[in-house]
Every structure is written in C-alpha cells, then in structure tokens.
Image (tube, rainbow, N blue to C red):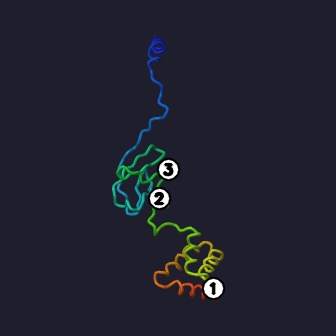
Amino acid sequence: MPEIIFSSIEKQALSPLPLKRYQIMDISTRKVSRMAHISYRHNYYSVPAKYAGMQVRLESNGTLLRIYSGQSKIALHAISHAMGLYISQEEHKPQEKRNISREEYYQRMSAIGPYAIEVFMQLQEKIPTHWHAMTKGILNLKKTYSTQIINSACKRALQFNA
C-alpha cells in the first residue's frame, strides 16, 4: 500500500536532487603561532607570516582547509591524514626564510664578480650536498665587506683550492 501511494502521488511531487552536492563545513577559529602555523586535526598548516599572533577562521569540508582573516582567504591546504606534520607553503614564509633557487644564487654571486661565480660553480660540483649553505655564507659576507673584497677572497680561495 505505501509503495502504491508513493508511486502514484508522492513521487511526482518530489523535486530533483541539486546538481552540486551539499557540503558540510567544519568551521572554527585558531590563533596563528609565532611560526605562522595553525593546528588542525593533529597537523600544522602554514599561513602567511604577517598573520602570526592573529585569530583566523578555518573552514574545512574534510578534504580542503581554507583559512580566512576577516573576509579574505589567506591560505588553502589539502588536508593530510598523517599526524604531527608541518605542512608549509613557500610563499607563506617570510622573505628572509624562503628557499633560494639555484638561478637566484647564481644572480647574487654574479653581482659579486667572476671569481665568486667560479667558486659557486665549483661548490655545486665538489660539494653537492652543502653548496647552499656555503653560498649563503659567502653572500652574508656582503653585510661586512665590499663586493671587491669578497671577489678577491674568492680568487684567493680558487688559487689555493680551498
């Protein structure tokens, strides 16, 4: 009997299902740590460094995590189901903490001079695991010394195979 009533009367009155599935959102707020990360489901997700110490709103559908400051979306992450991970995006790091590409290092060393470029090339060839740190050390010398002095030091290092 209920099947007959459903088929003859109720089925025709039903509206079709929406084309887009309704999403149930988990909405909460967090304070951004001084390391510019928020915790969510046992992981730490990055936000731009300028939001450190501020309150932000999180919205998650279980797959994506959207992070807002006021009405502005400041970060978007795929949710990880692992635990205890720091999930960071390079563009969220402060400028001085971002990874520098090989090409950028080359440009910075070329601004010092030709011997600095030669040292850079040899570091990459002879010490492939540590050339980043050593190149960064040479570039930090610019805080104290002129490019001419650093280039001359690179020439001397090359002469003595240092």
Residue at numbered disc 2? 86
Q: CA distance from mark 3 to mark 2?
A: 13 Å
Q: Amino acid at mark 1?
A: Leu
Q: Nearer the viewer, mark 1 or mark 2?
A: 1
Which residue is drawn at the image coordinates 33% and 55% (left, top)?
Answer: 55
Asked if the residue under mark 2 is in contact with the one under mark 1, i.e. CB atoms within 8 Å, the reply is: no
Asked which secondary structure carries label 2, the reply is strand
Q: Amino acid at mark 3?
A: Ala
Q: Which mark is residue 158?
A: 1
Front residue of 129 and 56 = 56
Question: Disc 3 to disc 1, how far (Cα)?
Answer: 47 Å
Q: From the top left corner, tell me how far across and down residue 18 is, in percent.
A: 47, 30
Name the side, left or right, on which 97 lies relative to 29: right
Answer whether labels 3 and 1 touch (C-beta < 8 Å): no
- Quadrant hosting residue 131: bottom right
Q: Could you tell me which quadrant the C terminus lies in?
A: bottom right
Residue at x 48% of width, y 34% of height? 20
Disc number lying in front (3 or 1): 1
> What secondary structure is marked by label 1?
helix
Q: Nearer the viewer, residue 83 or 132?
A: 132
Residue drawn at x 56%, y 67% as measured from the top left: 101
Which residue occupies 44% across, 65% down? 94
Q: Position of residue 84 (x, y in %)?
A: 46, 56
Q: Quick one: label 3 or label 1, which is nearer the N terminus?
A: 3
The three-letter code of the residue at mark 2 reads: Tyr
**Relative to 144, residue 68 above or below:** above
* Image depth: mark 3 or mark 2 in front: 3
Cα separation, mark 1 vs mark 2, equals 40 Å
> Circle 3 is placed at which residue position?
78
Q: Residues within 10 Å of mark 2 (few under 14, many from 20)?
A: some
